């Protein structure tokens, strides 16, 4: 009886050690890979819980975020979608992002190193983190005229 209890105890201890080893391996070595995985819904929900920065051209809003009451706290709005879509691209749950939304994503979502001071101030003041703004060099009148000419 003692021999079988000893074998079971050793087996249970070995399984606990293996579980602790696996948890350590996951948290220390594979955490960055799991965080960067596009199938990770937590990262996506975290991105939609922060206000993304605005995209402007000569003072005109091309893209901005609005607060909602859904599980996604902020959603993107594109006031003149047709004329500026080739430039701004889009930020979508289903289709990821394109254009400036993808190219300037670290700045727009607030993770860019240039926003370190703002993130630090937001942390100490308790404000919700938000993204930085992007001001494009396109001329809205020329962009609209080009779009109208293609119609």
Image (tube, rainbow, N blue to C red):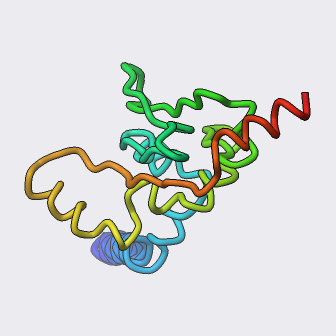
Please tell me in which quadrant of the rendered image residue 4 appears: bottom left
Q: Position of residue 133 (x, y in %)?
A: 42, 52
Asked if residue 8 can be seen in this view, the reply is: no
Q: Give above or below for 151 relative to 27.
A: above
Query: Which is more toward the observer, 113 or 16?
Result: 113
Query: Which residue appears at 43% of the width and 78% of the height?
Result: 25
Count of numbered circles in the view = 0
Query: Which residue appears at 50% of the width and 37% of the height?
Result: 61
Q: Give above or below for 23 relative to 128.
A: below
Q: Quadrant of the N terminus?
A: bottom left
Q: Quadrant of the C terminus?
A: top right
Give the residue at the far right of this rendering: 150
Query: Which residue appears at 36% of the width and 76% of the height?
Result: 24
Please tell me in which quadrant of the rendered image residue 104 appears: bottom right
Query: Which residue appears at 88% of the width and 33% of the height?
Result: 149
Query: Which is more toward the observer, 27 or 120?
Result: 120
Q: Position of residue 124 (x, y in %)?
A: 9, 58
Asked if residue 82 can be seen in this view, the reply is: yes
Q: Is residue 43 left or right of residue 110?
A: right
Q: Position of residue 15 (x, y in %)?
A: 40, 71
Q: Position of residue 98 (x, y in %)?
A: 69, 51
Q: Is residue 78 left or right of residue 2?
A: right
Q: Give above or below for 36 relative to 146.
A: below
Give the residue at the far top of this rendering: 69
């Amino acid at each position: 009886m003692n021999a079988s209890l000893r074998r079971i105890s050793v087996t249970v201890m070995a399984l606990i050690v293996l579980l602790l080893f696996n948890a350590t391996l996951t948290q220390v070595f594979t955490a960055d890979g799991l965080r960067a995985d596009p199938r990770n819904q937590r990262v996506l929900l975290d991105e939609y819980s922060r206000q993304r920065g605005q995209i402007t051209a000569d003072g005109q809003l091309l893209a901005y975020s609005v607060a909602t009451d859904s599980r996604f706290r902020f959603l993107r709005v594109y006031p003149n979608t047709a004329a500026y879509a080739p430039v701004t691209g889009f930020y979508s749950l289903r289709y990821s992002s394109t254009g400036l939304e993808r190219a300037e994503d670290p700045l727009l979502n607030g993770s860019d190193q240039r926003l370190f001071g703002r993130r630090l101030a937001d942390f100490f003041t308790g404000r919700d983190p938000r993204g930085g703004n992007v001001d494009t060099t396109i001329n809205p009148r020329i962009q609209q005229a080009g779009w109208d000419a293609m119609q």
